Amino acid sequence: MNYQRMPIEVESPEELGYSTIRYNLAESSVRDIHFKDLNIDLGDLMLSYGEHSGSLVLREEIVKDEPLDADHVLVCPGAATALFIISTALLQKEDHVIVMRPNYATNIETPRAIGCSISFVELTFENNFQFSIDEVREKLRSNTRLISVTSPHNPTGVVFNHRLMLDLITLAEERNIQLLVDETYRNLNFQSALQSYYAAHSPNVLSVCSLSKAFGVPGIRTGWILTRNKKLMHRFLAAKEQIIICNSIVDEAIARHVLAERDVFLQRAHTSIAANFRIVKDHIAGSSLEWIEPDAGVVCFPRIKKEVLLDLNKFYRILYDKYKTVAGPGHWFEQPDCHMRIGFGYPSAEELKSGLDNIEAAIREAAI
Ligand SMILES: Cc1ncc(COP(=O)(O)O)c(C=O)c1O
């Protein structure tokens, strides 16, 4: 494995230092919460190893109301580890992978670190960041092992058309390859009903999700892989056992509590995201930015309009140094820096308004 640090991690707010940032528009989650606000007493918790797949009660909670059962769940330390397990368990350097780009950086970087050949399906502003099934079909090779998509999408917040996703599943079944659907943002469906995980549709689909984005608890590092494919599940468990054996028993106990209260958490999250979404929408209408409106999630990926001429390096420098504001520059996603990911779930309404005004001010001050 040829590991390289990714810009999105090197330049992340937690690596820059939260104390250096006043208006944090670079996060892709709702605001983090304090442990004390959960009101849980873990005093009786035995600090033993846990069940290797994740505790049965937690796995049952994860698939509650889903057409899947606990055997279809592998609990992992965050969606990040789930994605790592999938890539390393499925792929060798001789394999070919089709990945939608832009994407969450790990979904590109881990196959790259393994040495796989990668074909990108480029999602464009002009095509509303939707993909074309014909393009995916054209890119298939005899050694294609995996097609990798993220929906709701990071960094655009677009939800892929359901019909298109079903076509992709059919394609994966016909060619007997795996389709990875990174569904880490699925619970942030603040303007539509929640759909079943795609893994429920076919044994050729792997779904990944976690508690990091919608519940304010990324620090407990709890995510999961869902698959109906028993053989693959066995292999993923073998990978997990070699990496970590089992999850932290403390994290699992907190995760169970959070999921048992999911309705309360999600109602609160959706109310605040919907209000912040309105703020971004109103702002963009009169700004130097243009966007494809996100369908779900807490991020969008606007770009500075072409007619606005500016020095982009200077813009990001002014934004951070002078205005103590951060957004995610396009290069985090292998895109031009005239694009920026704006996270609207993390800041308060006031912080968001000021952060957006600061972006506008920095654009003016970086004009050429
Ligand atoms: C699409 C996507 N998948 C996975 C992850 C990793 O999340 P986790 O904190 O659950 O490891 C992220 C985090 O930003 C993400 O955006």
Image (spheres, rainbow, N blue to C red):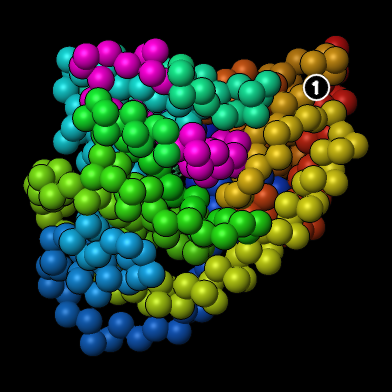
* Residue 64 relative to residue 297: left or right: left
Residue 281: % across, % down: 79, 45
Q: Residue at x 84, y 18 (%)?
A: 308
| Picture quadrant where residue 127 is located | top right
Residue 277: % across, % down: 73, 52
- The residue under label 1 is 305
Quadrant the N terminus occupies: top left
Q: Residue at x 74, y 55 (%)?
A: 276
Q: Residue at x 26, y 39 (%)?
A: 204
In this view, 293 is above or below 105? below
Quadrant the C terminus occupies: top right
Q: Quadrant of ligand 1?
A: top left
Q: Per the image, is 156 magenta?
A: yes
Q: Per the image, is 330 magenta?
A: no
Label 1 CB less than 8 angstroms from ligand 1: no
In this view, 2 is above or below 356? above
Question: Could you say which is closer to the camera, residue 62 or residue 348?
Answer: 62
Name the kind of residue labelled 1 in the image: Lys
Question: Could you say which is closer to the camera, residue 101 or residue 348?
Answer: 101
Q: Residue at x 30, y 74 (%)?
A: 253
> Range of the magenta residues?
136-165
Residue 229: % across, % down: 18, 47
* Residue 262 relative to residue 349: left or right: left
In this view, 140 is above or below 175? above
